[in-house]
Amino acid sequence: MDLPVTTLDESERKLLEIRCDDCGATLTLPAHRFAAICPYCASPSVVDRPAGEDSARRARPEFILGFVIDRKEAARRVQAFIGRSRLFAPTAVKHAKVSAVEGLYLPAWLYGSVAESQYQARIGENYTTTETYTTTDSKGNTTTRTRTVVKTEWRELSGTHATYVLDVLVTASQGLGNAELETIEPFDLRALRRYDAAVVSGWIAEEATLERDEGHRLARSEATSFVEGRIERFLPGDSSTLQSFRTTFSNEDTDLILLPIWVFAARYGTDGKTLRILINGQTGEIQGKLPRSPLKIAVGVLLLLAGLAVAAILAMTVLGVAL
Amino acid sequence: MNAAMECERCESPLERGDLRCAVCGRQAPDTGQRDTALSIQVLRCGSCGAAVSYDATVGAPNCSFCDSVMHLEEIVDPVEQTEGFVPFRTSRESARARLKQWLGDQGFFRPSDLATRSRLESLKAIYWVAWVCDARALVTWAADSNEGSRRSAWAPHSGTVHLEFDDLLVSASRGLSEQEIHALARHYPVHAVAEEATGLADGEPVAVETFDVQRSQARRRIVSAIHRSAAAQVEAYHIPGVRFRKVHTSALLEGLDTRRLALPAWVFTYRYKDRLYRAVVSGEDAEGITGSVPFSYARLFLVIGIVGVVLLLILAAIAAA
């Protein structure tokens, strides 16, 4: 059955915002939830504060992608991920409660533009030719023979390449860097919706803490490498080298979008090292670096050496007896 | 045309429900009055009053107490609908006459009695569906051609060209094959478009094909068809030389305007010596006809036989001399 979105009491509209002093993330929580640790880095140094002054100035999201992976599935994937490299993982990580996985909406900049490039390239065109060569056979006679060889003729080519750049996503969060976001991309942007508070209800959402200018700079550099790849594939010839290209971006736009991700963060050890596993909340792609415990590796190596020594002694004994 | 808005970047018409431009990805202007401030709200279930939250498995806010699902704005991706019908401009008789004439001049390797012995099995009037597009494109290209080659047979070339597409036909039909449509495409000048399917003068029913793809998929097909057509035009008219390879194009499409039309056609099935063949005549211009025709093996073997005999005679003459 379909329900109308009911109107809200003013008291329920109150937002709760936390700011992590460690990783710089600013998160908005549902009013009925409390967070004592940062979902990104499991740091306890979070400061609660009422939302208001700051958040009004921040960029507003235009689009949102809804979650497809639910908590149970996310926890199962984290469990499987940790299980894969269980042997040398620190004990604290192995026994971490995977249900502590947290679903949150990550802010990102969605960039698009028109890219027109001037390029300079060297194009290699192959041709075959016959060449004569002399060789000495086994009897020491010198003979002249011919063979066909493939050679490459290099030609200069300059020209224009024009394309639309679409769907470039870069992080708008200080808590989660762009390189890390890239590991769980791509997101299926066909499921894009216009931002609607109902999709965020009950979930944690992060405010865009990375300015639009910074996002724009990141997006441009991603767009430039995208264009470079396109030009390299665009060049004719049997082989080619792109020598230089200059791209002019025009008609650019950068929209704020919320992306669904599951984060599993844990702290371990006395020096507070963090472990972070990310799951794409739409496709289920999981990425993260599992730490290896140096102690466990050392023990493992020692055990291996001891095993070898025992085997050697045994072998020598057996051989000695036989002799 | 229900397109009231245009994309700010590439001037392609936008349709109702579009979030972004299908061609260049630019955000469509938001017409709805919505609260866009990032806010976490507690939503109350309309039937039991409990707080509800967005549920990933349902893809919508869901009340865990009474299992009600709140209705969210849907992602708009409707199945394409026919917008107009191009009326029949050829009559049943003229189509039949065209078929007869066409069967008559099929060349030497067709059976000589093709026009007289073929028996018409059925003749149906149909409306088949296609997207008819107008667009402008800035096409940049790079390719190898024989022009200007030195030691290698190939030399690289590049260029930029502005192309205009006027009434480009992109088939959405499942009934007619790609080859049939390719052969008939230039015989649909799309002179007039009617809102309703017009019947035939003789009152016979017309079969109407409908679109069976969704908007998003339709657009992918249209855009890739335009890119293919651009590449074909570049190869035909803009690359110097006569032999080409590695033709690469990259285009900026602008002002892509698409009409979803039903186009008239006459579909014949005819029987020649126990086998069925099909021919299609354009309902707009009877000159346009395509189809399959039987092949005369008798005539092929006859030619091979004559050539063989002639060769033997020549050999015999040489031997005698």
Image (spheres, grey):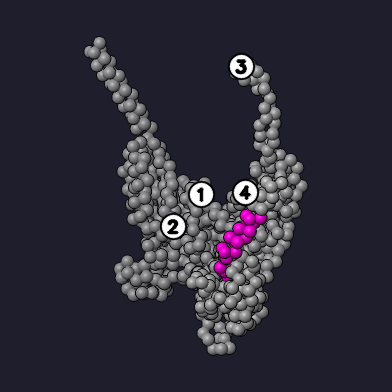
Marks 2/3 in contact by CB < 8 Å: the verdict is no
Q: Earlier in the sequence, mark 1 or mark 4?
A: 1
Chain at numbered mark 4 = A
- For label 4, the residue is A233
Height in image: A66 above or below B115?
above
Report which residue position mark 3 lands on.
A139
Q: Which residues are magenta?
A: B291-310
Q: In the rendered image, which quarter contains the N terminus of chain B? A: bottom right
Q: Is residue A283 left or right of residue A162?
A: left
Q: CA distance from mark 1 to mark 2?
A: 14 Å
Compare marks 3 and 4 and give the one earlier in the sequence. Answer: 3
Between tags 2 and 3, which lies in front?
Answer: 3
Tell me residue B33's x, y (percent).
Answer: 53, 73
> The residue under label 4 is which amino acid type?
Arg
Q: Residue at the location (59% across, 69% down)?
A: B111
Looking at the rendered structure, the kind of residue marked 1 is Glu
Q: Residues within 10 Å of mark 3 (few under 14, many from 20)?
A: few
Nearest-to-viewer mark from 4 and 2: 4
Residue that protrudes farthest toward the bottom in the picture: B202
Mark seen at residue A182: 1
- Tell me whether circle 1 and circle 3 mark residues in contact (CB < 8 Å): no
For label 4, the crowd category at 10 Å Cα-Cα, with few meaning under 14, some 14 to 19 and many 20 or more, is few
Give me the C-alpha separation between circle 1 and circle 4.
Answer: 22 Å
Q: Are marks 1 and 2 on the same chain?
A: yes
Of labels 2 and 3, earlier in sequence is 3
Q: Amino acid at mark 2?
A: Gln
Q: Main secondary structure of the magenta part?
A: helix
